[in-house]
Amino acid sequence: MSTQLTNSEINHLVTFRQALHRRPDLSGFEKATAQTVIEELQKLSPDSIVTGLGPWTEPDGTLLGGTGIAATFDSGQDGPTLLFRCELDGLPIQEQSDLAYRSELETKAHLCGHDGHMAILLALAMRLSRQRPASGRVVLLFQPAEETGKGASALLRDPVFEGQVPKPDMAFALHNLPGLPLGTVALKSGAMCCASRGIRILLEGKPSHASMPQDGISPVEAMMTIAAGLNALTNGLDAGQALDDSYKLVTITHMSVGEPCFGVAPGTGQIWATLRTVSDDVMGSLVASAEQLATVAAREAGLTLQIEQDDIFAACTNAPETTDLVAKALEAEGITTEEQSEPMRWSEDFGQFGHHCPSTLFVLGSGESQPQLHNPDFDFPDSLTPSGARIFERILRDRLG
């Protein structure tokens, strides 16, 4: 039986993707997007649809997430479970375009292509609805909150996911990549995307009148010491430097001190920084170094210190066995493929899946002249949807039949 998509189905996928583009949801708030996806999946009669996956609670008690969807197509025969993942969330950025389907929501937009990734997985569902795998089963996972690094970990520790969704033996994902020729795939085994996390260093002393700063405890000198120390931890800015296990990058993204007032010597300050490494082990040592220098500087200045972590992304490491499956599928489908020489500097929440099963993430070119990801004028090319689904299907047919 042919699983090839008809022209009518391809047109429907374009309509589906552009509808998502008009009404993006931010990380943790993807209920409307999830409902749109559920309604489309129900038309294709998978063997199960599990919804409401991946809730988590913020420190202030706010419940977020819980929008993940897992649709399973089961052969009814013994065999492994292959999981294919896409993302539900958009970005808090104002879109700047003349597209007829541009975002209708202020400061919310699909500027990373997650709307297109969802369309690819829906296209794969269409193909699976015609022909289940010959053995094992396929799980199509629509994950919340990739952009904040909170969605995958929340989903993987969700007891509903553990209890109602077949445990994956292998996991696969793709991400579109501007700058790479349209439809070309870049693939590598091993380290694929960097680990990263944000740290907030919060310092509290005592404010004073600006004419009597000695009567207060100012964080200014400690902040200067910490900022210089954080910058000194970086060894990842040399031109041409390879991204290997020694790579460490600390980017100070925000600093503030006191209040905007000429009459008050400040009593509080904060530094935000993003830490980036190739491996999770090196990330652990980099975090420890950053926290240690902040602790020493705060103690010497007589300041109270609080350190918070957020936007935590595990390193994404492609396993040899799953990467080999992808490579063979690309060759069989005649997809132009480039060997990726080093990891991506950006991070991907898919890295969490590698701690649970062999997994591979590859990038699919969205055009050499395409605006970069997260740019206000980025748009996912709809022509990638059928080819992305075709690659995924070849992977699963090669493994499951």
Image (cartoon, rainbow, N blue to C red):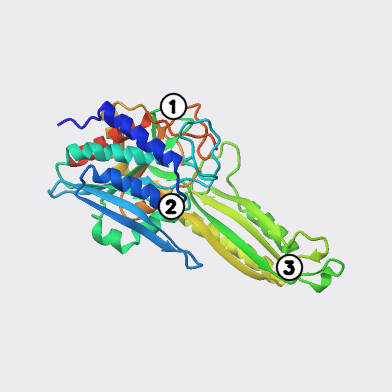
In the rendered view, would you say 124 is above or below 269? above
Q: For mark 2, does the 10 Å Cα neighbourhood hold few (<14), some (14 to 19), or many (20 or more) residues?
A: many
Q: In this rendering, would 297 be left or right of 316?
A: right
Q: Position of residue 343 (x, y in %)?
A: 46, 41
Q: For mark 1, does the 10 Å Cα neighbourhood hold few (<14), some (14 to 19), or many (20 or more) residues?
A: some
Depth check, front residue: 80 or 341: 80
Q: Position of residue 222 (x, y in %)?
A: 71, 63
Q: Earlier in the sequence, mark 1 or mark 2?
A: 2
* Residue in the image at 26% along x and 40% along y: 125
Foreground mark, 1 or 3?
3
Q: Secondary structure at mark 1?
A: loop
* Residue in the image at 50% along x and 46% along y: 91
**Disc 1 from disc 3: Cα separation:** 52 Å
* Residue in the image at 33% along x and 57% along y: 52
Foreground mark, 2 or 3?
2
Q: Position of residue 10 (x, y in %)?
A: 30, 30
Depth check, front residue: 337 or 105: 105
Name the amino acid, label 3: Gly
Q: Is residue 362 visible?
A: no
Name the amino acid, label 1: Pro
What residue did someone put label 2 on? 145
Depth check, front residue: 2 or 325: 2
Q: Secondary structure at mark 3?
A: loop
Which part of the image, by quadrant, shows the C terminus?
A: top left
Residue 267 circle label = 3
What residue did someone put label 1 on? 181
Q: Earlier in the sequence, mark 2 or mark 3?
A: 2
